[in-house]
Image (tube, helix red, strand yellow):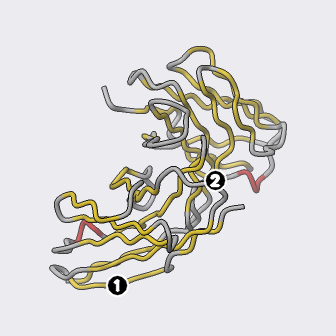
Amino acid sequence: GQNIDQPTEMTATEGAIVQINCTYQTSGFNGLFWYQQHAGEAPTFLSYNVLDGLEEKGRFSSFLSRSKGYSYLLLKELQMKDSASYLCAVSNDYKLSFGAGTTVTVRA
Amino acid sequence: DTEVTQTPKHLVMGMTNKKSLKCEQHMGHRAMYWYKQKAKKPPELMFVYSYEKLSINESVPSRFSPECPNSSLLNLHLHALQPEDSALYLCASSQEGLAGKNEQFFGPGTRLTVL
């Protein structure tokens, strides 16, 4: 089975940094994805990690430790438009299994 | 073209109606997916098609019937739905339906309401 945990909600101030943690226990692992989803819209791809370490892409970075079953998404220089739900998803064979999502609220 | 399109955007249907959701992609992707998403919940996988063949059915009730007429199109036929089937239905595609990096591109979804 799949068990993917992430915090339900986080709040931060514009310009700040927020780190969203994700822990997983899955019966197979072919990579971990982070998606962003604004209310009422489709998820959009942010990052992919399959090897241990940090992947940086602009203001967003994602880290993976396979031995610990742990990942985080780091959002820097927060902007109001970053207010959204952030979904951690583990790839296993054909499937993406999603965590429940973390709602990030950015305040002025 | 890096888009997955879905029609209709919104659909309201009665429990005795028959309707279809449509999904299209022209990225040459060989895997296509249907997900169901309830409010404030993550997407739940329903079906996976790989090379136009049904690969995964996540024990979805038979009132949902998928169809893949060709590599670019994916349909979801709906019949005798229940009010609890009301949700956002997302279509996605990926380059290959294999293990490994399998970035899925999502369509905008169809918001379905069953009365």
Please name the residue shown 51% across and 43% down the image.
Answer: B109
Q: Which residue is most to the top?
A: B70
Dot 2 crowding, Cα within 10 Å, few <14, some 14–19, many 20+: some
Tell me where residue B29 appears, x and y as whole percent: 46, 26
- Which of the 4 image quarters holds residue A4? bottom right
Tell me where residue A90 appears, x and y as whole percent: 53, 57
- Alpha carbon distance from label 2 to label 1: 26 Å
Chain label for disc 1: A
Helix, strand or loop at disc 2? strand
In which quadrant will I find the N terminus of chain B?
top left
With respect to residue A70, does A12 lie above or below? below
User: Mark number for residue B44?
Assistant: 2
Asked whether, in this view, residue A83 is left or right of residue A108, the answer is right
Residue type of the residue flagged with mark 2: Glu
Instruction: Decide which of B82, A89 is in the foreground and name it.
Output: A89
Tell me where residue B49 appears, x and y as whole percent: 63, 29
Asked whether, in this view, residue B77 is left or right of residue B97, the answer is right
Name the residue that disc number 1 marks: A11
Helix, strand or loop at disc 1? strand
